[in-house]
Each structure stands twice: as structure tokens, then as C-alpha cells.
Image (cartoon, helix red, strand yellow):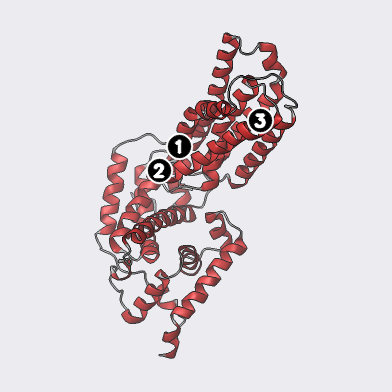
Amino acid sequence: MPAPSDPLMSSPPRLDPGALERALAASRAELALGRPVRRWRPQAVGLFAASAGMALATTAVFVALGRTTGSAVLGRAPMLAMLLATSAVCSWAALSPRGQQLRWVGVGMALVSAALLVLTRGAMREPSSLPEWVCTASHVAVALVPVAVALAVLRWAAFNPLRAAVAGLAAGTVGAFVGELACGLGAGHVAAYHLGAWALVALMTGALSKRLKPRTYAP
Amino acid sequence: MNQAMGSVTDEALMDLFCQGDHSAFEALFARHAGRVQGFLARMVRDGPLAEDLLQTTFLSVIRARGRYEPGTRFTPWLLTIAANAARDALRHQQHVDSHAHAPPEGLTSVPAPDGDPVLRRRIEDALQLLPLEQREAVVLSKLEGWSFEEIAQLRGIRAGAARLRAHRGYEKLRELLGGLEDA
């Protein structure tokens, strides 16, 4: 008796013979549209630019409004640089077709950044009259533009939960960046309301990305 | 044009296509469309859906050519796209079926092939009863000749996990086809 799979290997199930012609016609119609080639590297740079640009623009506004000073920004420069580096690595890893290992590096950098945000904060720097959840809402609000960019570029590849979450981490660095400059509350507040918002942005990006129909199923 | 490209590798054709040579795409389509069609037919066992997915796969190749990295082996890249499309479609179908409380209609919508149609249909029906991950592992390893490392790379899992999925798929197939051995 032949092995159960042998008949399967002999020939595939028959389909409508016109299927190949119709698929080729659809492909030719797509090519005839002459759409530009979407390359993943510019998309990764675009995601990073959206996150970093939003962070730097918000910083400029804070300095202009007197909410912070240039010297205060310089004093936090190592932490801010770490957040920008995390955003860059996560953006690249999320869009790279072969970035599986780099995605875990991005997750690791985000965890290190999160730990540093808490550990370098220490005690409360200044009291606040606003409720603490305002930081969470602000964190999510400033991340909306980068999240929109992330969702747009993620549609050019097949959905992958880790890829989407890492893109969300890249988008969420803007909130951590702004929170580092604008919030003077203590480490416990940062851990709960800032990092919680960063995780929320990552999860939100993953959930929304899963619901959007991808434009391609490429890896 | 396609004759002139007969000796060109898939990867070189894909590089040419990425540089704007549409005839290179047509050559790739001529080489691989039949194989992709067979793979999709086995994965979804639904003629109209398989045809849709065939179109989706090659549309993805066109739209995602900016994601193709030089040096990547073309056939696994192409079948990864097809597998991703099939998986997405089947998940959507399962979701719709679960809400409709109706059994999937795909099991008999593809005509039986030549040979022993009864045996063939039983095997293909049994294949459709496997969980999606196991079916994919069985089809890719047994029928498409992929290594477990390649399947693992496709799904972002370890090679051992891919081997386990295929092994469980074979075991389930043996259970489902137990009656064949008695016949």
C-alpha cells in the first residue's frame, strides 16, 4: 500500500484552467498602474523620523514656552539619546524583512531604556497639581502621529505580532522622551504612568495593525 | 523574451524586476505560478479562494518588490508570501464560519484530480482537518520539500517546533486515514 501522502505528491488538485491567465492579467493591470516601488529602508527611516521629529519638535515648543531650559535638556542628553537610539533600532527592526533577531534587540533596548527611565528618576523632583493620568494621556497623544505612520508602513508586509509591537515601541519613544523633559514626578509615577503608556502604545499598534488588511503578504 | 531568460536564475530575474524590467516578472510568473497554484489549492482546498490567493500572491510580489533583498532565495520568499496569504484567508474563513455556525464548504469545492479520486479526496479532506499550523508544516515539508529550518524561519519559531508541528500533522493524518490501511 502506498504511503498516505503519495497521491498528494503526484499532482496538485485541479483548479480552473483560466485561473493562471486571470492572475497574470491582474498582475499586468497592477504593473500598468506604474506605482512607485515602496522600499523598506525609507519606510524605516520615515517611522524613526516621525517619532524623533515629534520628540524634537515638542522639546522645541517646551523650551520656547519656558517649560524647560536648554541646559535641562543637555543634562538629560544621555537618556534622551538612549531613547532616540531605541527608536532608531526598533524602527529598522520592525520594517526589515529579515529583522527577527534585531526585533528582540529592539525589545531589549526598550526594556533597558525603561529601566533607566525609572532608575535615573530617583525621588520626586517637583510636585504637580495635575492628576497623574494626564502624563499617560499626553504620552499616548504625542505618539499618535508616529503610530499612524507605523500602521501605514506595516501594511506593506504580512502581519507579525512582534514586528507590530516593535514598531509600536518605536512610536512610543516620543512619549517617553517628552515625559523625561516635562514631568517632575518620582520613579513610581514614571513606572506606572509613563511606562504603562509606552506599553499601551505598543499594544495598541499591534492590535490596530492586526485589524488592518495588509497591502502585501511579503515577509 | 522568456526564452532569452530561460537560463537566468530566479534571483537574477527578481533583481531585474526590481530594477523595472516587467518581462522578468512575467518569466517568474511563468516559472512559478503553477507551483504556487498547487500549493494554495492544497492549503485551502477551495477553488475560488485558491484563485484569489494566487492573484494576491503575485500582486504582493509586485507591490512588495521593494522588500525583496538581493541574495534572498526567490522560491522560499514567494511561497512565504503564498503561505502568509493562505493563513490570513483561512483564519478569516474560520472566523466567519464560527459566527455562521456552518461547516466550511471548501472540502469538496476543488475537483478531484486524475488517478484514484476516492483515495485522493480522502487524503485531501483529511489534510483540511489538520490545524492550520500542522497543515502548513506538512504541505511545506512533505510536498514542497522545505527543510524544518526554512519552515521555522517562515514562522519565526525554532526548527524543533516546526518539526513537531509536522510530526503531529503526520500522526493526525494517520489517525484520520486509519481506514485506508484496513481497506
In this picture, residue A122 sits left or right of residue B113: right
Disc 3 with disc 2 on a shared chain: yes
Disc 1 with disc 2 on a shared chain: yes
Q: Which residue is mark 1?
A: A151
CA distance for labels 1 and 2: 8 Å
CA distance for labels 1 and 3: 29 Å
Quarter of the picture holding the N terminus of chain A: bottom left
**Marked residue chain, label 3:** A
Q: Residues within 10 Å of mark 2 (few under 14, many from 20)?
A: few
Q: Which residue is mark 3?
A: A189
Identify the residue at image location x=61%, y=32%: A193
Q: Is residue B132 above or below residue A216?
A: below
In this picture, residue A17 sits left or right of residue B77: left
Query: Considering depth in this image, is B40 or A117 the residue closer to the camera?
Result: A117
Look at the numbered disc 2 and give the secondary structure of its residue. Answer: loop
Q: Which residue is mark 2?
A: A212
In this picture, residue A18 sits left or right of residue B14: left
Label located before the other in sequence (3 or 2): 3
Label located before the other in sequence (1 or 3): 1
Foreground mark, 1 or 3, reads 3
Callout 1–callout 2 Cβ contact below 8 Å:
yes
- Residue A152, percent from left and from top: 43, 35
CA distance for labels 3 and 2: 34 Å
